[in-house]
Image (cartoon, grey):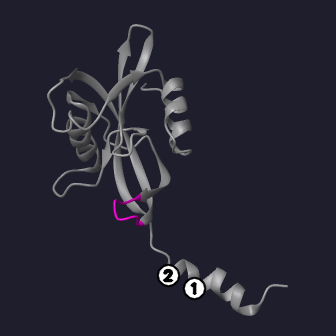
């Protein structure tokens, strides 16, 4: 049997005390490859395959911040970024100090026209162009998998 306190906690107090998710922006960089559409993945600081992503940047729209992350983390020098997010996913963000917070990541498509090998985080990250299906299989975030697998830039 559920206690009155448990019901009060679940229905009224817990939603008020929980932090809302923090916001990040991600770049789903894509191009036409020899075998069809390719998307770009980079390694995280923990060695997992992810999209280039980061925090919103003062003075930039979310789409512009996603483009900035694509430059810093993957060397995407030029491309056309969509003004609106193609979707979002929720995950837990773990900081270096061990703290974990819920995070919502808005994903912006970028049609890549130029990639360079000399970029700010080149010495800290690997990058790879793969098919949508390969990308969906390589990433860990369950909410990102369907965005990648179903991505259609049209």
**Residue 62 among those drawn in magenta:** no
Residue tagged 1? 13
Look at the picture and state if 13 lies above or below 78. Answer: below
Outermost residue, bottom side: 4
Residues packed near mark 2 inside 10 Å, few (<14), some (14 to 19) or many (20 plus): few
Q: Quadrant of the C terminus?
A: top left
**Residue drawn at 80 percent across, 85 percent down:** 2
Q: Give the range drawn in magenta.
A: 94-99
Q: Which of 61 and 137 is in front in this view?
A: 137
Where is residue 94, by image quadrant? bottom left
Q: How far apart are marks 1 and 2 (CA)?
A: 6 Å
SS class of the residue under badge 2? helix
**Residue drawn at 42 percent across, 26 percent down:** 153
Where is residue 142, by image quadrant? top right
So how many labels did they put on this image? Answer: 2
Where is residue 101, by image quadrant? bottom left
Q: Would you say residue 150 is visible in this rendering?
A: no
Report the side of 106 relative to 11 (left or right). Answer: left
**Residue drawn at 54 percent across, 37 percent down:** 145
Report the side of 50 relative to 133 (left or right). Answer: left
Report the side of 38 relative to 127 (left or right). Answer: right
Look at the picture and state if 132 lies above or below 104. Answer: above
Q: Nearer the viewer, residue 70 or 47?
A: 47
Q: Do the residues labelled 1 and 2 touch (CB within 8 Å)?
A: yes
How far across and how far down the image is residue 90, in percent? 50, 54
Residue tagged 2? 17
Q: Which of 47 and 61 is in front in this view?
A: 47
Which secondary structure class fits the magenta region best? loop
Q: In which quarter of the image is the N terminus?
A: bottom right
How far across and how far down the image is residue 100, in percent? 44, 64
SS class of the residue under badge 1? helix
**Residue 98 among those drawn in magenta:** yes
């Amino acid at each position: 049997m559920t206690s009155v306190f448990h019901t009060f906690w679940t229905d009224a107090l817990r939603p008020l005390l929980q932090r809302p998710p923090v916001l990040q922006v991600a770049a789903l960089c894509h191009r036409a490859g020899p075998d069809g559409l390719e998307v770009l993945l980079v390694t995280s600081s923990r060695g997992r395959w992810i999209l280039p992503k980061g925090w919103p940047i003062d003075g930039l729209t979310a789409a512009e911040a996603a483009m900035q992350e694509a430059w810093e983390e993957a060397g995407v020098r030029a491309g056309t970024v969509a003004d609106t997010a193609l979707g979002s996913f929720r995950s837990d963000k773990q900081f270096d100090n061990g703290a974990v917070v819920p995070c919502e990541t808005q994903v912006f498509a970028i049609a890549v026209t130029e990639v360079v090998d000399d970029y700010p985080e080149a010495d800290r990250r690997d990058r790879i162009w793969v098919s949508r299906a390969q990308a969906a299989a390589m990433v860990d975030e369950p909410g990102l998998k369907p965005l990648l697998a179903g991505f259609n830039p049209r």
